[in-house]
Amino acid sequence: MSTYLSQLPEELTIGYIGSVWKALHDSLQNQLHPAEESQLVIDASAVRLIDTAGVQFLCALDRYARKSGLCLTWKAKSALIDEKFESLGLCRLN
């Protein structure tokens, strides 16, 4: 199993989502091999600011991982992320 670790930036807001997604997607395309099982480990401990676009990004990332056959796990997650999900009436990320 190959593992890819990605650390999210401090700001997960509408102004940064495009560049965060591009960097993550490009890295995944270059490093992961479709023939082997792969794990995507997200470190979100540095996130200090997240808006609704950031929440949508995390939901889309989860969906992308499932569709791509990646096992998505969280190495660390700031409490702010769970608080934001709950404030929007969404389930917390596992």
Image (cartoon, rainbow, N blue to C red):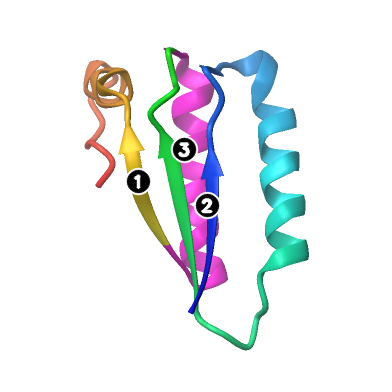
Label whose residue precedes the other's in the sequence (3 or 2): 2
Using the numbered discs, state the Cα–Cα distance from disc 1 to disc 2 in whole angstroms.
9 Å
Label whose residue precedes the other's in the sequence (1 or 3): 3
- Badge 3 crowding class, 10 Å Cα cut-off, few under 14, some 14 to 19, many 20 or more, is some
Counting the numbered discs, the total is 3
Image position of 68 with respect to 13: above or below: below
* Residue shown at the point (57%, 85%) measured from the top left: 36
* Residue shown at the point (52%, 47%) measured from the top left: 61
Using the numbered discs, state the Cα–Cα distance from disc 3 to disc 2 in whole angstroms.
15 Å
Q: Are marks 3 and 2 in contact (CB under 8 Å)?
A: no
**In the image, which residues are magenta?**
49-71
Q: Hey, which residue is sitting farthest bottom in the picture?
A: 35
- Badge 2 crowding class, 10 Å Cα cut-off, few under 14, some 14 to 19, many 20 or more, is some
What kind of element bears circle 3?
A: helix
Instruction: Answer left or right for 60 relative to 31.
Output: left
Mark 1 lies on residue? 75
Residue 22, percent from left and from top: 75, 41
Mark 2 lies on residue? 5
Mark 3 lies on residue? 58
Decide whether the magenta segment is chiefly helix, strand or loop: helix
* Residue shown at the point (49%, 32%) measured from the top left: 56
